[in-house]
Image (cartoon, rainbow, N blue to C red):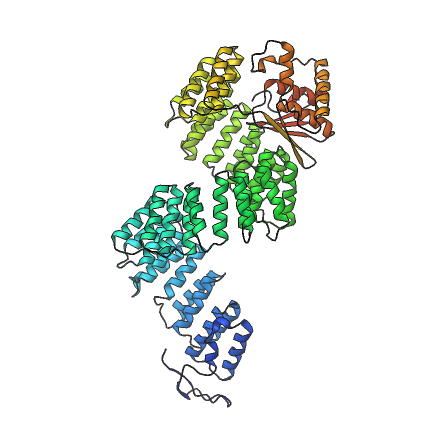
Amino acid sequence: MAAALIPVLPLATNPPSENGYRRLPVDHPILTLLDDYAALDDARVKQIHARMLRYDLFSHPYAASRLLTASFFSPSPNLPYALQMFDQIPRPNLYSWNVAIRAQASGDRPDLSLLLFSRLLSDSPHSPDRFTFPFAVKAASELVLPWVGAAIHGQVIKSPFHSDVFILNSLIHFYAACGDLDLARKVFDNIPQRDVVSWNSLITAMAHADRLDDALELFQRMEDDGVDPNDVTMVSVLSACGKKGDLQLGKWIHFYIKRSRITECLILNNAILDMYVKCESLEDAKALFERMTEKDSISWTTMLVGCLKKSEFDVARNMFDEMPTRDVTAWNALISGYEQNGRPKEALAAFSELQDSDSRPDQVTIVAVLSACSQLGAVGAGKWIHSYIKKNGFDLNYHLTTSLIDMYSKCGDLENAIKVFRSVKQRDVFVWSSMIAGFAMHGRGEQALDLFKEMEEENIKPTHVTLTNILCACSHGGLVEEGKAYFSKMLPLYNIPPDIEHYGCMADILGRAGRLEEARELIETMPMPPPASAWGALLGACVVHGDVDIGEIASRKLLELEPRNDGGYVLLSNLYAKAGRWEDVGRLRKMMKEQGLKKERGCSSLETHGVMHEFLVGDASHPQSERIYEKLEEMTARLKAVGYETKRSQLLQNVEDDWAKDHALNLHSEKLAIAFGLISTEAPVQIRISKNLRICEDCHSVAKLVSRVYERDILIRDRYRFHRFKEGWCSCKDYW
């Protein structure tokens, strides 16, 4: 910059009069102290400010703007002090206004940036220039204020800068941040000369909003227009490929990057890694990872996620242990990877390790471990984590509230789920939906419907998930007519067209009620191709009600869609077994063996004193196995004394001898778990059991009698719902 007018100022004399101005070089001894403002701290800035006030330098707009820049953009800026300094400048030039507006837009008070912009318009002789507008637009983007940004856009149109690409690029980002991609596209289309930033802004916006085809189409147009993409472009394009899961296109993009000699910086390599992981090409990801000369925590964490997704748990654990540094993001990847891939025990063990590390769990960690507790039915661990949330001052936001309600509900502690729900004043639709789901899985259909009505009174609009939960509540509660009524009102009343899940729930409602032909007609007349889950629900209902004819139809449809669905074969086999058609049972088992399919073994688990115990059918591996079987014999004898008779129809094997039938049924995993619960806990402690399959009628009868004879409260969560046994009754009212 050329020399500027500042007062004539002998450094050791009193300040001159207002008219004593002459041209001084820009390297004035005091001003040169501001040249390297990146090395100045707040105290030093204040010292320079004091010297400039002493020699009347601060009254000159140029000198004041130099100090203002240093104050706002030093390594640790004192923004309130800098703003006070700005307010003391007698006649701030436009550069000073821009510095102040920019600093606040990038700080934690973007509202002050907009206030300064408003003051510039009303109190200053200057008009905004091509730098002012983007800073103000950025502030509106940070605050997501569509009307403010639109007003600034209107001023841009009236200004001499209406075609400035720098300003228009900022408006593309603004409209994208506000979720209005159509307006962002309109701004883009009206830019006379687009630069690479213009294309990148819109491509990135489309990729982030999951308009993936639009993002890729823009990339193609960018090439056609002769604009060379850069690494920023390719990061967004790779993101779109990864989200689409299009490995072939992703590989082409990788080749394009090499061919175009785009610098493969760390950020770009991480984007390529992420694309390969999301496209489930772990080998390509591993090959790139090995070639990378520079890696950061994102690189390592991406590979960790990839290994976990491919169930390479040992490789993932070794990779985690080899990471140079492990931040909370890496811990979250490990814990969430275990939890999402059916390894809840390992997830809780990793969380325990995290407690002893230098990292601190965040909300993502807590949500993952609560989900792991839900899978295990580990209410003790879940309660400890709830206490941890309170002790460590976590904000009980919607996400955490939903996770806690879900954990307590799935662990069988519905009363605590209700307490969490009632303890929060602000509830979004997901919190309401989670509590409705809790009532549904516990068979409290009427309470679920009452809560839904309460939700409507609070003017909370239901989502498709809410209505799925309502239909599930009707299914588990036997509320057939209520379910049909809600199903018929979905589109006209709630403007939510029924989807596959809703039709599946409706088929389940009819099937459980024994209205099998009606359920079949509903599935066959669905407006979309019926999914395997709908036919599976019908087949399960046929097993319960013993309808072989419809069951065979449902099985055939199910296996056409999913030929390797072992559950479909097992259900049909059970249906044949109940009907005494043992030759058909043998035929199905032979087919399963030939295809390498195995029936899932029944497994029941319960938590005592913070330790999870698991039992398989006929299990003898538990350290207290001898005592468990002694208790089981005693239990059987006491139940027979009060009239218990084995439901031999529940034995799905061709056994002729009645004693052998009884013995086989006594080895069911939930009976072993009940026996262990009786010897390891005492009343009034509830025996809480989780089973991976549907509880059979014989075990259901045994649990009811045990609850009366032993005066114990028993809770069993099977694959579909909860059963609470108390004083000889079950909460399902024998409807499950």
Residue 84: x %, y % from top left: 51, 71
592 lies left or right of 165: right
Residue 67: x %, y % from top left: 47, 75
40 lies left or right of 243: right
Residue 512: x %, y % from top left: 51, 20
Counting labels gives: 0
Q: Nearer the viewer, residue 614 or 481?
A: 614
Q: Residue at x 46, y 21 (%)?
A: 594
352 lies left or right of 80: right
Q: Nearer the viewer, residue 195 or 20?
A: 195
Residue 4: x %, y % from top left: 38, 81
Position of residue 112 relative to residue 458, above or below, is below
Residue 398 shows up from this direction? no
Quadrant location of the C terminus in the rendered image? top right
Quadrant location of the N terminus in the rendered image? bottom left
Position of residue 343 relative to residue 106, above or below, is above
Position of residue 75 relative to residue 62, above or below, is above
Q: Nearer the viewer, residue 225 or 644?
A: 225
Q: Residue at x 46, y 79 (%)?
A: 32
Residue 715 shows up from this direction? yes
